[in-house]
Every structure is written in structure tokens, then in C-alpha cells.
């Protein structure tokens, strides 16, 4: 057995024994961009694939400060008390800043992170959204193989990453603040449309009446949207992550969602569809990297770009010319 293979074998062994350190090392391996690491990562993924998939994958999004970390801590502890094992992954393509505010300095989910039945992994630093999304998908498979039956994928609700997350999970949960109409305007309609469940957080103390109003407004807004599933109408829940209120209700609704989609086979079909589109995403991402790396393309790219900018070349013509350079042996 070569050195590389024995490294992969020991990671596979550790993961099958639910060893969190092996899982963490395996994720570091798949995050590496080194070619030899990539080969090991592929070998590892092939080995663990038959043991993956046995979880519910939940995307959690919301603007900074809405209480994602507080919610995940409270929700995670509730799940553990019911015998589940919870993995938390984060997607934040901007995380080269400070490691991002996600899982950053403010709330570290300190209680949850100390649990044997929890695994928390911050967003891989740097890279494109496509790259970060790809590594998170693979990390998700590794977590499942390590026996985590609930996988939470957290993202900040400010950009495109919600779409990427919603495409890799079974259910997308949007956390919102207890404020009225203006708030509703501030949330991009597109993001609301992704939500299978809206949770109004901070429904406590003085904020309770506002939370009730907001929940009613969101309920009405969701009613106007065409549901993306024939088997599920997006619901609105209220909770206080800080005071652990309404958290078990959220989980009950998630279980109902899973049961409904499972019995209608929508759950399974969605996973299959996601796998195929993941393959194509992977092809696109890899082709683009290879394209930009090719010497002939690199040296012509700038000129082509300025030709397009100054109107000397039609964009499609420039693209075709560059593609010809790429496909030349
Ligand atoms: N009153 C009240 N405050 C809450 C609740 N949940 C979170 N908070 C507070 O809101 C602030 C932000 O909470 P976080 O959990 O850090 O929010 P976040 O969405 O993770 O923020 P980012 O990581 O910056 O995106 C903190 O001061 C929390 O204590 C809640 O249910 N009720
Ligand atoms: Mg946070």
C-alpha cells in the first residue's frame, strides 16, 4: 500500500468510527487545492460515498445579527437531546475577511461545539462561491459518513450564496427579524421564494408584538408566492433562540416536511436531481479553471477583453476565439 493510500484508508477508518478529528482532517484534505491532495480526496470520497446520504440537510440563512448562531446553538442542543448528531457547515465566500462573522468572534456556539454529538466547521476561506459550495457539498457527504444525521448549512443572507445553499440541501430555512413592512421590503423576493420555512426569531420580551405582526405579514407574503413543491406549503414559525422558545416546534415542522416529501418521493427525486446538477457544476467549475490556466488563453485574454470593451470585437466572437485557443492541443 502506498503512503497516500494508507492516509486515505486511515481517514476512512476514522470516519467510520465517528472520530471527529478524522472528519476534520478529511475536510481539510478536500479543501486543499493541491493536485495530489485532490487525488486522495477523490479516493476518499469514493470510499465513503456508500455511507453518505443518511441525513436531513437543512440550509439556514438570514441577515447578519438575525440570530443564526444563537439559533443553531439552541436548535442543535435540542436535536442532541433527542438523540441526533448535528454537523454545522458554513458557506461564506467572503470569509477571507476575518474568517467571516459566521462562526466568527461574536457567537462561537460554545455550548454546542463542546458536544460529542456535534461537529462545527467554519467556511473554507477564499475562493469563488462555486469553489466554496463544492467543498461544502463534499464536506456534507463526509459528515454523513461520520454518522451525523442532521447537517446544517449556514449562510449569511446578503448575496448569492443562498441560491447555492438551497441547491444543496433538502430544506431551506430563512430566519427573519421581528419587524414590519419595511423589513419585508428589504428582503429580496427571490430569497423568500427559496424558503421552505420562515422563522421569525427574537420573538421575546418587547419584541413579541412586532414578531407576531411580522409573522402575519410573512405568512401573507408567502401565500402570494407559488410554492415550489406540490407537497409542501412554506410555513412561518416564531421562536426565541435566546430563550429556547419555539425551537422544538421548528423541528416538528421540519420532520413533517421530511415525511411529506419522502412519502411523495419528492425528497429522493430532489437528491437525485441535485447530484446530477452537482456533477455539471463540477464540470463547469473545472473547465473554467483549466481554461483560465491554459497558457495560450492567458496570453490572449487581456487583448480580447479590451477588444470587447472598446467595441472592436463582438463578445461572442471573442469567446469563440478564446475557446479555439483553449481547444488547440
Ligand atoms: N432578544 C433576542 N436576541 C437574540 C435572539 N437570538 C439572538 N439574539 C441576539 O442577537 C445578536 C446576534 O445574534 P447572532 O446569533 O450572533 O446572529 P448571527 O445571525 O449569527 O449574526 P452573524 O454571525 O453576524 O451573521 C446577539 O446579541 C444575540 O444575543 C433572540 O431570540 N432574542
Ligand atoms: Mg453568526
Image (tube, helix red, strand yellow):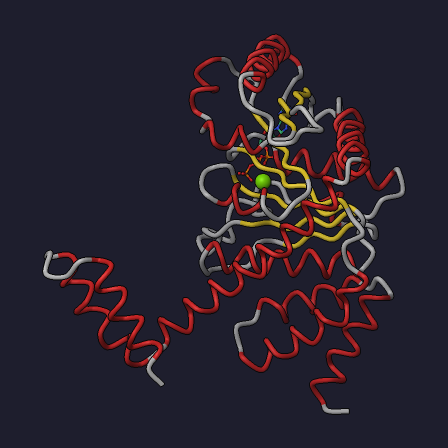
Figure quadrant of the N terminus: bottom right
In the image, residue 110 lies at what x, y percent? Answer: 71, 45
Residue 39 relative to residue 301: left or right: right
Write down the quadrant of residue 150 in the picture. Answer: top right
Write down the quadrant of residue 193 in the picture. Answer: top right
Tell me what residue is drawn at x 76 percent, y 72 percent: 47
Figure quadrant of the C terminus: bottom left
Q: Is residue 92 above or below residue 291?
A: above
Residue 301 relative to residue 40: left or right: left
Write down the quadrant of residue 323 in the picture. Answer: bottom left
In the image, residue 186 lies at what x, y percent? Answer: 43, 24
In the image, residue 129 lies at what x, y percent? Answer: 47, 54
Q: How many marks?
A: 0
Q: Is residue 134 above or below residue 58?
A: below
Residue farthest along the bottom direction in this orientation? 1
Tell me what residue is drawn at x 41 percent, y 66 percent: 288
In the image, residue 226 lies at what x, y percent? Answer: 56, 24
- Where in the image, quadrant-wise, is ligand 2 located? top right
Tell which of 160 and 157 is nearer to you. Answer: 160
Residue 324 relative to residue 119: left or right: left
Tell which of 98 and 140 is nearer to you. Answer: 140
Tell which of 163 and 208 is nearer to you. Answer: 163
Q: Is residue 18 above or below residue 293?
A: above
Tell me what residue is drawn at x 76 percent, y 68 percent: 22
Tell which of 99 and 37 is nearer to you. Answer: 37
Amino acid at each position: 500500500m502506498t503512503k497516500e493510500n494508507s492516509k486515505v484508508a486511515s481517514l476512512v477508518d476514522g470516519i467510520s468510527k465517528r472520530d471527529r478529528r478524522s472528519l476534520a482532517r478529511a475536510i481539510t484534505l478536500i479543501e486543499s487545492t493541491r493536485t495530489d491532495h485532490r487525488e486522495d480526496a477523490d479516493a476518499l470520497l469514493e470510499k465513503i460515498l456508500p455511507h453518505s446520504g443518511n441525513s436531513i440537510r437543512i440550509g439556514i440563512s438570514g441577515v447578519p445579527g438575525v440570530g443564526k448562531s444563537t439559533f443553531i446553538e439552541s436548535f442543535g442542543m435540542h436535536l442532541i437531546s433527542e438523540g441526533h448528531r448535528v454537523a454545522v457547515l458554513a458557506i461564506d465566500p467572503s470569509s477571507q475577511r476575518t474568517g467571516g462573522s459566521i462562526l466568527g468572534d461574536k457567537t462561537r456556539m460554545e455550548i454546542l461545539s463542546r458536544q460529542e454529538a456535534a461537529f462545527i466547521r467554519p467556511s473554507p476561506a477564499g475562493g469563488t462561491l462555486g469553489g466554496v459550495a463544492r467543498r461544502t457539498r463534499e464536506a456534507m457527504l463526509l459528515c454523513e459518513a461520520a454518522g451525523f444525521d442532521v447537517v446544517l448549512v449556514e449562510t449569511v443572507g446578503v448575496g448569492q450564496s443562498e441560491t447555492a445553499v438551497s441547491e444543496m440541501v433538502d430544506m431551506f430555512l430563512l430566519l427573519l427579524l421581528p419587524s414590519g413592512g419595511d423589513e419585508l421590503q428589504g428582503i429580496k423576493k427571490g430569497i423568500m421564494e427559496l424558503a421552505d420555512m420562515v422563522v421569525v426569531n427574537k420573538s421575546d420580551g418587547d419584541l413579541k408584538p412586532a414578531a407576531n405582526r411580522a409573522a402575519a405579514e410573512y405568512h401573507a407574503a408567502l401565500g402570494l408566492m407559488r410554492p415550489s413543491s406540490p407537497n409542501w406549503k412554506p410555513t412561518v414559525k416564531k421562536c426565541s433562540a435566546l430563550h429556547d422558545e419555539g425551537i422544538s416546534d421548528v423541528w416538528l415542522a421540519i420532520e413533517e416536511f421530511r415525511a411529506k416529501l419522502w412519502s411523495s418521493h419528492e425528497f429522493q427525486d430532489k437528491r437525485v436531481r441535485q447530484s446530477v446538477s452537482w456533477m455539471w457544476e463540477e464540470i463547469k467549475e473545472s473547465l473554467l479553471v483549466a481554461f483560465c490556466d491554459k497558457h495560450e488563453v492567458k496570453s490572449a485574454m487581456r487583448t480580447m477583453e479590451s477588444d470587447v470593451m472598446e467595441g472592436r470585437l463582438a463578445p461572442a466572437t471573442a469567446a469563440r476565439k478564446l475557446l479555439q485557443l483553449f481547444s488547440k492541443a
